[in-house]
Image (cartoon, rainbow, N blue to C red):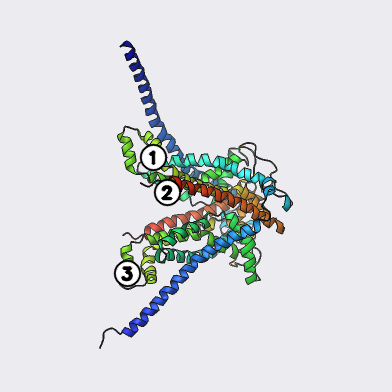
């Protein structure tokens, strides 16, 4: 009898301890999890502060006015000039070509998959297209330099080895899955009742796609295009390999150019000493790039909210 | 007098039908073009790369001579970097996802974290490189090490991992949680023993896909200043190293034509690694995915 109670007491003690431990775990675990969630916020803060801090250092040496309005980017010259416009022009040229390639193709694919293709075709094709988005950009860059540029040179003999056309086309292919896939999602989520209503009135599938589905899915389609553009602006390795390193302020797509990202790569792969103006200039350019993509991303989410059709 | 002129209607209808078929084929053409791009890309890589791809290529260090060049240090370096990225990004990503899905109240702060994650996903990878250079390489003094590169890459893929993990956790039906609570389990016990086991296939699939992005990323490594010519294997997490994409970048830039083929062979190694990782992801998804 006495023996039995002593076991019970021991069990009780063990239970009590267990409960305490449990209570302790229940309190500590959410705090640890919260910290992991805050890491993402800290990353953003880290990025913004790093960029602002080092850009500020850059603007102690170069006037903001020269940076924003200057049309010459010659940081390695004896008498360096830091006007960012040529780099922006290079970025926008490549992005524009990418958009010209990716938007018609992407929308065509999205319409085909959502309106014409059978479920089987869609199920097989979508993951294959996603593969295009998973290929490392360095591979695309190599492909642009060694395959697309020589091929284009056969068509346009005046094309330089480094140009905007070849990386632009390849970036277009790279962002194609983003645009096609997101647009297709938007089109597929247009309710079938609307589609069938139009078909019942005698429209052809093409008319339904163009006049019913596309307008109804417009918010998603526009958002996908803006997101694709934002990726094109931030793309680095393709333009570093196939775009060249000549920052020029013009709209010529056949000559060598330099984008914001390619400049950062050029400086990083060389030996710009820590603390030099060139070293700080990559942060100023990086900050400019960050602002561009941030505005694009905010615009994408604004567009998809503003023009959303609710059914 | 008939109100409907059958002839005109028939004519109009046939034009509309023709238009429909025409455009259908144009859209199909767009799809085929995209697939063709993929096929050509694959064909070029294989036809160019196989010449240099052999056992020695995997065992040699980088060299000035194309026939002696190899990916040994880079392959080991890439895998070593992955050994840091995988635990760090999964721990942070899954932790954040559990917090957001299971613990967070629906308030402004949670909304802010969520918005921040989706914005972070849109930041160009090269900007993460600048972050890594300033914070990890310089401020924390890690140098151009595996640790610095691994942490930078972890932060880069963190948003992808979080979103994938969130989707996997959200897909676990509530009745499982409620059954667990009903048996007297605490919140953490429920998450640890019920929610996570059901969500783990989804988390791993998304996680591996994110990791394969980290393996192929070049820009952050260039910015951090990872060296290209490395004649030794990494000895620890603070050791200098090189990675596959860095080597490919370096070879592709060289003027000699032979190095183009070496670069293509390097690309093949990278792609085989990626295909291997992706197949594991697909295998996990097919093997363990449960439908409720």
**Would you identify the image quadrant in which residue B73 lies?**
top right
Question: Is residue A311 shown left or right of residue B90?
Answer: left
Label annotation for residue B115: 2
Is residue B253 visible in the rendered image? The answer is no
Residue A100 percent coordinates (x, y): 51, 66
Residue B186 at least partly seen:
yes
A109 vs A133: above or below: below
Q: Earlier in the sequence, mark 2 or mark 1?
A: 2
Tell me where residue B13 appears, x and y as whole percent: 36, 79
Q: How many marks?
A: 3
Which one is closest to the eye, mark 3 or mark 2?
Answer: 3
Q: What residue is disc 1 on?
A: B195
Q: Name the foreground residue: B152 vs B268.
A: B268
Q: Which residue is mark 3?
A: A198
Q: Is residue A44 above or below residue A162?
A: above
Which chain is home to disc 3? A
């Amino acid at each position: 009898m006495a023996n039995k109670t002593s076991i019970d007491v021991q069990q009780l003690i063990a239970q009590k301890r267990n409960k305490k431990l449990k209570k302790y775990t229940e309190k500590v675990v959410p705090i640890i999890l919260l910290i992991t969630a805050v890491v993402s916020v800290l990353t953003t803060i880290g990025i913004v502060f790093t960029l602002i801090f080092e850009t500020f250092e850059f603007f102690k040496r170069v006037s903001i006015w020269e940076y924003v309005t200057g049309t010459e980017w010659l940081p390695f010259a004896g008498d360096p000039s830091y006007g960012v416009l040529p780099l922006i022009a290079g970025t926008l040229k490549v992005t524009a070509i990418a958009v010209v390639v990716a938007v018609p193709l992407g929308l065509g694919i999205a319409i085909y998959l959502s309106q014409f293709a059978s479920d089987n075709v869609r199920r097989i094709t979508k993951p294959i297209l996603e593969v295009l988005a998973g290929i490392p950009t360095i591979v695309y860059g190599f492909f642009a330099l060694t395959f697309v540029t020589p091929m284009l040179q056969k068509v346009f003999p005046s094309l330089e080895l480094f140009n905007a056309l070849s990386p632009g086309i390849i970036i277009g292919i790279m962002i194609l899955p983003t645009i096609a896939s997101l647009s297709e999602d938007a089109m597929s989520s247009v309710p079938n009742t609307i589609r069938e209503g139009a078909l019942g009135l005698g429209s052809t599938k093409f008319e339904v796609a163009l006049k019913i589905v596309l307008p109804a899915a417009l918010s998603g389609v526009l958002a996908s295009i803006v997101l694709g553009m934002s990726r094109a602006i931030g793309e680095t390795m393709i333009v570093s390999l196939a775009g060249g390193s000549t920052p020029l302020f013009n709209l010529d797509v056949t000559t060598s150019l330099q984008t914001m990202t390619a400049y950062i790569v050029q400086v990083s792969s060389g030996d710009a000493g820590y603390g030099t103006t060139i070293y700080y200039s990559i942060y100023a350019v990086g900050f400019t790039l960050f602002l561009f993509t941030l505005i694009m991303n905010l615009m994408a989410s604004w567009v998809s909210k503003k023009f959303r059709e609710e059914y | 007098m008939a109100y409907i002129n059958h002839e005109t209607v028939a004519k109009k209808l046939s034009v509309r039908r023709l238009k429909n078929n025409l455009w259908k084929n144009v859209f199909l053409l767009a799809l085929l073009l995209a697939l063709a791009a993929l096929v050509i890309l694959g064909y070029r890589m294989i036809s160019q790369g196989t010449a240099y791809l052999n056992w020695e290529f995997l065992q040699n260090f980088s060299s000035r001579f194309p026939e002696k060049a190899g990916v040994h240090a880079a392959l080991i370096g890439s895998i070593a970097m992955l050994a840091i990225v995988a635990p760090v990004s999964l721990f942070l990503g899954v932790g954040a996802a559990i917090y957001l899905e299971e613990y967070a109240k629906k308030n402004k702060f949670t909304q802010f974290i969520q918005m921040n994650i989706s914005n972070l996903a849109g930041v160009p990878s090269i900007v993460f490189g600048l972050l890594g250079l300033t914070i990890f390489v310089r401020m924390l003094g890690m140098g151009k090490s595996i640790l610095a590169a691994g942490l930078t890459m972890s932060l880069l893929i963190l948003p992808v991992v979080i979103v994938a993990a969130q989707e996997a956790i959200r897909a676990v039906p509530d009745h499982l949680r409620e059954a667990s609570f009903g048996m007297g389990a605490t919140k953490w016990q429920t998450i640890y023993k019920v929610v996570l086991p059901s969500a783990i296939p989804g988390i791993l699939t998304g996680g591996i896909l994110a990791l394969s992005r980290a393996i192929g990323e070049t820009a952050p490594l260039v910015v951090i200043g990872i060296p290209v010519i490395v004649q030794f294997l990494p000895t620890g997490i603070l050791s200098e190293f090189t990675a596959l994409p860095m080597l490919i970048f370096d070879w592709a830039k060289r003027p000699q034509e032979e190095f183009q083929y070496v670069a293509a062979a390097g690309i093949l190694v990278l792609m085989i690694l990626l295909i291997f990782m992706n197949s594991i992801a697909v295998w996990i998804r097919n093997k363990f995915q449960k439908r409720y």
